[in-house]
Image (cartoon, rainbow, N blue to C red):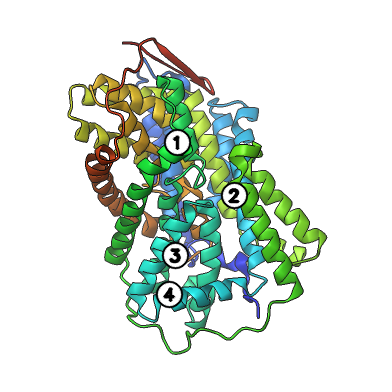
Amino acid sequence: MTIDMDIAKQAEEGGAEKSQQYVIKWLIISFAVGLIIWLLPTPETLGARGHAFLAMLATVVILWTTEALPIGVTSIGVGCALILFNVQSAKSAWEPYANRSVVFVFFIIMLGVMLGQTTLPQRLMNYILKLGGRNVIRLSFVLCMGATFLAAWTHDATITIILLYAILPMFLKMGITPDKSNNFAKHFMFIIPMGSACGGGATFLGSGRSPASAEMLAQLTGYTIGFNEYMLYQFVPSMALGVATWVTCLIIYPPKVKELPGEIAIEKLPAMTRNEKLLSWFLVATFLMWFMTDWTGIHVSVAGGLFIVVCMAFKVVDWKRCLAEYPWNPLMVFGAGFSLGVAMLDSGAGKWIASQIFPIFVGSSWPVVAAGASWISAVITSFMANAAATTLLVPVVVPMADMAGTPAVPIAMAVPLATTFVMLVIGCPPTLIAYGFGYFSQWEAFKLLFVRTILGVIVLCLCMAVWYPLVGMPGNIDMMKTPAKLTMSGYELIVEK
């Protein structure tokens, strides 16, 4: 038996249709806010392009949060606005929509759609039910921590899509659809992607932001962190953040159901078909290719693309059905997030924001600097993909730590963990993928993500204070003896001692 559902319907924005009055009201408010910011005097160090970008960003964030327009439509408008207001050239505005990480997300979501045509998600759910039992609280903990652990060894987006497809049959049996979403559905639709995002920062395999942070640190300071050393520092804090995520979901969206209903049971499924066996082997081969990307140098998107090609060559699934069920909105939003991230760098807005923040932390104790770096990470990554945000933020927080007289390594290592504290769903692939199923709105996500950010920053700072010294993380090693110059898409940062 396969999951018989129309994924395209699952991706309807927020379930209920917005009234015309609601749409017009928020369109007026969003454009008015952007206009007011644009009419303000341009700071001398910001420049016209950066000023226009910040005004446009305010409008986009309001439209995304209120969903006055479908989130995918607003995402298309991002590219148009960047060109119209001379923030970016047409090439620079649209190219990020086809960024290799965006393409990878496309493949990951397609992988999930293909899994939905098999019994593999039900088989996985049977195993989860064996571990978690019928108690909903215990089951949610097993799912959250399982997602956190598994994402550390594969990829947070991959684990998100697999576990979401495993949980959807349970929703359908309980009569829960996007239009009839409740706390039970929201609870599980949040713990899976957010738990996976936490695990993504545990190892170099978990997400692109992990190796990116180590690479940026090496370029800035000359201190190189290898695979095992990175995992030693980050694995335990990632698991702690997974627990913090579970607690937050339990507080904000406590499931009203305490025990799973009788119709939710471990199903006795027939033997796997030839196509399901083939898909399973192709999936294992894909995972192996993802594991070996550090040695092969082949980007993870290649493995995802080959998986789809091989599956279609062997007619494992129905391609026409995959296209019909594919939720396109998340892909458009992720592309827009990358485009905004590049524009923030190119326009000088990112450098200007950093220059406004630096003075606050001069002379501060390291816990203050750590908390500040984490909050900066959460805010910045809310408007762009967390891999791109990490690339931007490490060159920001390292000199910030240096100016404050704080050890640079622990502050830099906080960034790939703190960039899981997104406050908008566009901030990382897992939350964006979950949003595409339509079980929660942007506002419902923001309420949870904001509280989780507060708790996450506290937990992360505690881990930095206890775990990092315990495992011997370097303190103030002799860094930055000479000016460090790093250029990223037009963003130039020079640090001098």
N-terminal of the two: label 1 or label 2? 2
Q: Are marks 4 and 2 in contact (CB under 8 Å)?
A: no
Circle 1 is placed at which residue position? 389
Circle 2 is placed at which residue position? 105
Q: CA distance from mark 1 to mark 4?
A: 36 Å
Q: Secondary structure at mark 2?
A: helix
Label annotation for residue 189: 3
2 in relation to 235, above or below: below
N-terminal of the two: label 3 or label 2? 2
N-terminal of the two: label 4 or label 3? 4
N-terminal of the two: label 4 or label 2? 2
Q: Are marks 1 and 3 in contact (CB under 8 Å)?
A: no
Q: CA distance from mark 3 to mark 2?
A: 18 Å
Q: Is residue 186 left or right of residue 317?
A: left
Q: Secondary structure at mark 4?
A: helix
Q: CA distance from mark 1 to mark 3?
A: 24 Å
Q: CA distance from mark 4 to mark 3?
A: 19 Å
Where residue 44 sits in the image (x, y, percent)? 36, 15
Circle 4 is placed at which residue position? 131
What residue type is disc 4 on?
Answer: Leu
Q: Are marks 4 and 3 in contact (CB under 8 Å)?
A: no
For disc 1, the neighbor class at 10 Å (few under 14, some 14 to 19, many from 20) is many
Residue at 64% from the left image edge and 76% from the top image edge: 4
Where residue 327 sits in the image (x, y, percent)? 61, 59
Q: CA distance from mark 4 to mark 2?
A: 29 Å
Residue at 35% from the left image edge and 56% from the top image edge: 242
